[in-house]
Image (spheres, coloured by chain):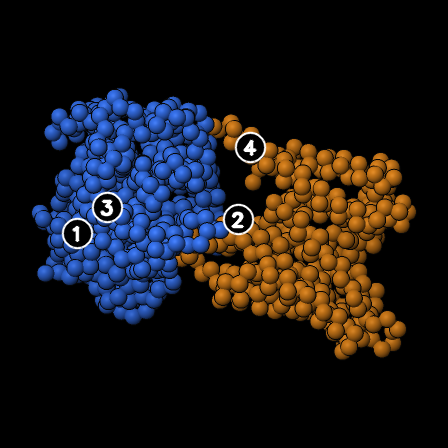
Chain colours: A orange, B blue
Amino acid sequence: MIFSAARVFVPIVMALAVGGLILLALGKDPFAYYEYVVGRGLLSWSGFQQTVIRAAPLLLIASGLIIAFRAGIWNLGVDGQFLLAAVASAALAPVLILALPSWLTIIICCGVSIAVAMAWSVVPAFLKTRYGLNEIITTLMMTFLGISLANVLVKLPLNDPDNTVPQTMTLPVPDRLGRLFDTTIHSGIIISLIAVLAVHFVMTRTAFGLKLQIVGANPRAAKHAGLNVGRLTFATFAISAGLAGLGGAVEILGVWGTMRADWNPAYGLLVIPLVFLARFHGIAVIGFTLLFAILMIGGESASRRMGVPNFYVLVLVALLLIFLALVEYLDHLSRQRKKA
Amino acid sequence: MTSVAGQTPAVSLHGITKRFPGVLANDDISLDIHAGEVHVLLGENGAGKSTLIGILAGMQQPDAGHIEIDSARVKIHSPRESLRLRIGTVFQHVLLVHSLTVIENLMLGDSWWRIHDRKAALAHFGQISELLGVDIKPDVPIGRLSLGQQQQVEIIRALWHGGKVLVLDEPTSMLTPQGVEELGAVMRRLAGQGVAIVFVTHKLREAYAFGDRISVLRQGKLVGDIARDRLGAMDENQATNEIIRLMFKGVVEEAQSPDVEIFLREGQQGHWSGSFDSSGPAAITLECVSTRAELGECALHDIGFSVMPGEVFGIAGVDGNGQKHLAEVLAGQRPVHSGRVKLRGALTAEAGVPARRLLGVRYITDERLGEGTVGDHSVATNLVIKEIGAPPFWLCGVTLWKRIFRHAREVITAHDVRTPSEHTPLARLSGGNIQKVLLAREISADASVIVFNKPTYGLDLHNTRLARERIVKAAQSGIATIVISNELDELLELSHRIGVMFAGEMSDIVDNHAGAEAEIGRLMTGAKAA
C-alpha cells in the first residue's frame, strides 16, 4: 500500500481551509481557533497527556475495526461491545481488588471484558454465516441493545448504593492501570499501540491475515480456494469485538475507575471515519487517531473558552473524508486518462 | 426483395471509434449493412465485435464516427432509441423473465399507461412466429422452454417493433448442432423477407455457412470484407483461404501458424489421439452422485463415470445442465447429497477442497475473476491462494513474501505471463494472461486429476491454442483430465470419451469416433441413447 504524502496532506489542508471558512461564517477567528486547539491539545503538557490518554481506547477500537473491515465485515457494533465490556470491568474490578493484587485484578478484568465483547458479537456472526443477514444492520441493532443493557446493569444490579448518581462501585486510583513514568498517562496507550502493531503484522505478514483479506476481497474465491469462510467470519467478529472490548476495559481501568449510567462516549462511530481515512492501514491509523485526539481534547477546551461548539470537530472530520474521497477520485481519473 | 449491391444500405456505420481504458476497442470502423442479407461479423474474442453491436444497440456511445439509417444520420443514445429505429438485438445470454410466459415477456416493453391488449399481442405473435417458421406456445412460462426456444423468443422480441435490422451476438454458443441448423433456416427466411441480419461469430464454419457477406475484425480494426457476389463465387476452400488471409495478414506467416491451425480446426475435428493405459485402476470414479440445488441452479441426478490416468474425458452439454455442480463436486467445493466419489479407490465424498488438493485434484474454474482469483490482489498472491499457510511460502503461519514474489517471477517467465510485474493486481491482466496464471497455479507435477471448466471461454486464438496444448500435455503426463465445455468442437478435438449432460443427468457417454458429433448433438437435447 503506497501512501504518497500529497494524497494525505492535500485533503487535510483543504479540510482545515474550508473548516476555517465555516468558522468565519460563525463569526469566529479561524486562526485563533486552530492555534488554541493545537496549543491545548498538543503543545501544553497537560493537554498532550490528555490527548495520549484519549488515544488509547480509540486505537484499540481502530485496530478491531481494521481487522473486520479488511475481512469485508462491517462491524459497526463496536460501541455496544465497548460499553458492555466497560460495564464488566467496572463491576468486577472493585470487587476483585478486595481479594486480589491489582495486577491480577487488571488482567482478569481485561480478559472478562474481552470475553463479554466477543459474546456480544456472536449473534451477528451467526446470523451472517447461517442466514446471510447483513452485519451492518445486525451489529448496529446489537449496539442499541448493548447500550440499553449497559444502562440497566449500571442502574439496577450493579448500582453503588453509597453514591447519589447511579454508577458502579469505584476502583481506587492507586489500583488502576499503572502510570508511565511521572505522567498522568496510563499504560493503556502501550497496550493499544501493541494491539495496532500486532494487527498490522497479522494482516500483512501472516497466513491468517491473508485468509481474512481473501474472504473480504472475494468470498467466492475464498470458498473456491478451500477456506472455511464461516469459521473465519466468526473469528473476525470475535477478534474485532474483543479489541473493542479491551478498549472499554482500558478506559475504565485507566481513566474512570467506575461506570456511570448513561455514559456512552460513542468512540466507535468517531473512529470509523478515521479507519477509512487511513485506508485500513495499521500504521497510518495511529497518525490519524492522534490527530483526532488532539482535535477532540483541544476542541473540548475551545468549546468552553471560545464558544465554538464541540461538534465542530466532527465537521472537520467530515470535511476531511469528503476531500480525501475527492482527491482519490481525481487521482483515479487522471490515471485512467493517462492509460487511455 | 433482396437488395442489390449499390442500393442504399439499411444501416451504415461511418468511422466508428470507441476507446476503453488501455484499449482501442473499435478503430475507425465503417460498414454498410444491407437489407435482405446475412452480414457476418467475424473475429476472434477481443476483436471488438461486441463493442460494435453494443453501439448499434444503444448500450454504448462511440467516441467518434456516426451511424446512418436509410441515409439519415441518427444518434442511438439508448436501447429504447435503438428499438424505435427498428434495430433488434439478441445478446449472447438470454435476457428473459423466467417466471413470466412467452407473451408476457414480449409485452414487457409496452408503455406503462396503455392497457395491455392481449389479443393484438397474440395476433402479432402469430404473424412473427409464422414469419420465422417456429412453433412456440405463447402461454408457456419461459423457464419451461429449451434454450434454443428461448433464443427464438428473443428473436421474436427483437422483431416485435417491426424488424429492420436483427443483430445476433454469438447466437450459436448456447445451441446444440441441430439448434444451429434451425437458426440458420430462420435467418434465411428473415433475410428473404428483407430483414438485414448482423450475425456475430468467431467460428469460420458458421461464417461461411450462413453469411451473404463477411466482414473481418481484428484488434478493433475492420481488416477486410468479402462482398456478396465475391463470396457467392467462392467455394468453401477459397473462402476459408481468403478469410485466413484477412485475419492473419501481417501478423503471422500465412496459414503456417499454429494459431491459424486452431481457427481452421474449429469444426474440422482434427482430433488429438494420445493413448493411455486403460487397464489400471481409475484415477477418479463417481457413483450415483446427486446434489441439491438452490433456486436457479441445476442439480445433479445419479451421475456416474470414471476417468483413467492419462485419459481426457469431455463433458458436453448446453450451458446450465448441471456442469457447474459437477465441476464443484469434483473439486470438493460442493457437498454431495448422495452417492460416492472415489479417488484412486479411496472414498472422498466428504473431503473438502484442501483435502482433495492434497490428493492431487485440481480445478480450473470458468469464472476466472468471479471465483478463481482475487482481482484486487497481486499476481503473486493469486498464484499461492490455494496454499495459504503451507510451506514453503509460510513458516509457522508467517508469510514469506520474498519467496512468494520469487516464485511468481519464475512462473511469469516460465509461462510467458504478460504483466508489468508480480505486484500488479490480477484484474489488470488480459483474459488470456489470467488464464495462464490459473493454469500455472493448478497444473503441477503432483496433480492426479484436473478439471477444466470451459478452458478457452473468451480467449483469443493464440491463448486458446496455449490452453489446449496444456490440456494435452497434462493428459500425456498421466493426469486424468476432465474437460467441461459448451464448444463441442473443442471436446471432439481433445477427448477420448465424451459424456453428455442434460437436465443434471449424464444421458450417455460416447466414444469419440467419427460420427460422434451427431449422436452427441442428439443427446444434448435430452434424447436417450439408442
Gap in angstroms between the C-alphas marked 2 and 3: 63 Å
Left or right of A112? Residue B455 is left
Q: Position of residue B11 (x, y in %)?
A: 33, 29
Mark 1 vs mark 4: tell me if same chain: no
Mark 2 vs mark 3, foreground winner is: 3
Gap in angstroms between the C-alphas marked 3 and 4: 48 Å
Question: Which amino acid lies under the numbered mark 4 shown in the image of this protein?
Answer: Leu
Mark 4 vs mark 2, foreground winner is: 4
At 88% across and 73% down in the image, what residue appears?
A164
Q: Which of A128 and A158 is in front in this view?
A: A128
> In the rendered image, which residue does mark 1 sit on?
B521
Residue reaching furthest right? A305
Q: Nearer the viewer, residue A146 or B188?
A: B188
Residue B132, label in figure = 3
The subunit letter for the residue under badge 2 reads: A
B465 in relation to B307, above or below: above
Few, some or many residues within 10 Å of mark 2 (<14, 14–19, 20+)? some
* Helix, strand or loop at mark 3: helix
